[in-house]
Image (cartoon, rainbow, N blue to C red):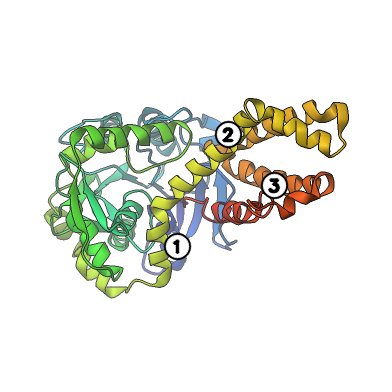
């Protein structure tokens, strides 16, 4: 470009909360981008300046790195993982994967590496997340590259994921639960993070430097939520201080859902990190870049909340409850059909004239219910479970209408109740996406 910026960028983690905003900004600058995503189907518009690659930072071999970096002049690494689960490891992503990335950059003679770490990891390491992030920083600092390490605090912006989504969800509650042992946060705006990266893409900018990206003011968690609640147009909520035992149960519940493949913002890692807070000195950031980070109140005031924001906030806490209830609904109906409800199921089949196939059909239906319930509970298969639930519900309506049509006129409406269940099913499909 005419201003002398790098023109070919490898953006790792381009579909994440920070990465997606960076991708849009890089394209707006007219830069050629090779953008990677880790999992799921790519749902991004085609672009003349972006090449999309599905790529696993923690398992890539040397040949994959070489192919990915061909023609690249600078690399931005936004990949991160808050807590270990059955499929991913913080150490694999933040340490082993990063080491392979740095080695690949050195061999490909990459001009610059901009690496996202996390605030406070240079001062304390209460969790595997922060320990692996600190080890990753040491790998980057020991390299021969022109590196920049950015340590953002809690990042918020127009979109919402992780902590930024949690603030909105908590703001929708008339009673605000306050967790014990939480420290202050210096909220940083995603726009300011993006501006910082664009600054460091300039070839005459500083390098081999680590900077905290912290907002200009410290807030308690309840203060942040209160500001979001005010922004959403709702009156102040009443604070409810949770006992340590109750808070501990909520954090462990978050770990349980994480084992099932979901990514709740709460968990034991979050508990340890919040005990230290997310604060830093924004002075060096301002001095080096000239960027004045925005206060949370200022950023919220510049973009008034719309009805979609209120929908999201209200649905945030209802979403996990909806999936849990719907999964249990199918699991329990399957168990009932195989146990206390088995004679009733057989009787209905006989009434419909099925005869000797009654038992196998009831058992098959129960097993199908159990399979659907388990699939909905498990995040990687949740969409298939919901689609299976739609198919199974429609099958029950058709078969039931053919075999026992009088159930349509039953006072308790066993067939009529299928329709609200079907609509609820479709609503869960509509809000399944997390990013």
Q: Residue 102 carries which label?
A: none
Q: Judge whether 30 appears above or below 240 on screen.
A: below
* Residue 142, position as x, y percentages in the image: 27, 32
Foreground label between 3 and 1 = 3
Separation of residues labelled 3 and 1 (CA atoms): 41 Å
On the rendered structure, is 400 left or right of 101? right
Cα separation between marks 3 and 2: 14 Å
Check if mark 3's residue and mark 2's residue have beta carbons within 8 Å.
no
Residue on which the image places disc 1: 24
Identify the element where label 3 is drawn.
helix
Choose between 35 and 385: the one closer to the eye. Answer: 385
Q: Is mark 2 on a helix, strand or loop?
A: helix
Question: Residue 34: x, y in percent?
Answer: 51, 51
Q: Which residue is drawn at 34% across and 71% down?
A: 305
Q: Position of residue 407 (x, y in %)?
A: 74, 49
Residue that badge 3 annotates: 393
Q: Which residue is drawn at 66% across and 49% down?
A: 414
* Quarter of the rendering containing residue 295: bottom left
């Amino acid at each position: 470009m005419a201003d002398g910026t790098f023109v070919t960028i490898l953006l790792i983690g381009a579909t994440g909360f920070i990465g997606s905003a960076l991708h849009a900004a890089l394209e707006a600058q007219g830069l050629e981008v090779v953008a990677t995503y880790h999992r799921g189907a790519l749902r991004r518009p085609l672009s003349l300046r972006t090449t999309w690659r599905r790529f696993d930072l923690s398992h890539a071999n040397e040949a994959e790195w070489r192919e990915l970096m061909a023609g690249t002049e600078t690399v931005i690494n936004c990949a991160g993982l808050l807590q270990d689960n059955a499929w991913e490891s913080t150490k694999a992503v933040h340490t082993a994967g990063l080491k392979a990335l740095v080695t690949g950059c050195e061999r490909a003679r990459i001009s610059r590496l901009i690496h996202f770490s996390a605030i406070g990891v240079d001062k304390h390491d209460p969790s595997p997340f922060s320990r692996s992030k600190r080890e990753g920083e040491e790998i980057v600092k020991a390299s021969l590259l022109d590196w920049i390490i950015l340590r953002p605090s809690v990042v918020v912006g127009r979109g919402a994921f992780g902590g930024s989504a949690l603030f909105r969800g908590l703001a929708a509650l008339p009673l605000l639960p306050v967790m014990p042992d939480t420290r202050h946060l210096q909220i940083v705006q995603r726009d300011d993070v993006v501006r910082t990266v664009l600054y460091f893409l300039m070839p005459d900018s500083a390098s081999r430097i680590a900077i905290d990206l912290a907002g200009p003011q410290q807030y308690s968690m309840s203060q942040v939520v209160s500001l979001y609640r005010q922004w959403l147009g709702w009156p102040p909520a009443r604070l409810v201080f949770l006992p340590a035992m109750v808070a501990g149960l909520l954090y462990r519940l978050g770990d349980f859902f994480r084992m099932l493949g979901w990514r709740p913002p709460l968990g034991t890692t979050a508990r340890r990190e919040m005990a230290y807070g997310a604060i830093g000195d924004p002075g060096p950031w301002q001095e080096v870049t000239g960027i004045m980070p925005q206060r949370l109140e200022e950023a919220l005031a510049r973009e008034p909340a719309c009805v979609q924001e209120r929908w999201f906030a209200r649905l945030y806490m209802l979403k996990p409850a909806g999936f849990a209830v719907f999964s249990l609904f199918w699991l329990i109906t399957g168990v009932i059909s195989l146990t206390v409800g088995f004679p009733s199921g057989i009787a209905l089949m006989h009434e419909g004239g099925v005869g000797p196939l009654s038992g196998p059909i009831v058992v098959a239906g129960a097993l199908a219910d159990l399979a659907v319930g388990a699939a909905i509970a498990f995040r990687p298969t949740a969409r298939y479970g919901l689609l299976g639930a739609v198919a199974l519900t429609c099958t029950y309506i058709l078969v039931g209408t053919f075999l026992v049509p009088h159930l349509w006129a039953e006072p308790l409406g066993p067939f009529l109740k299928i329709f609200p269940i079907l609509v609820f099913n479709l609503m869960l499909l509509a809000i399944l996406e997390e990013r």
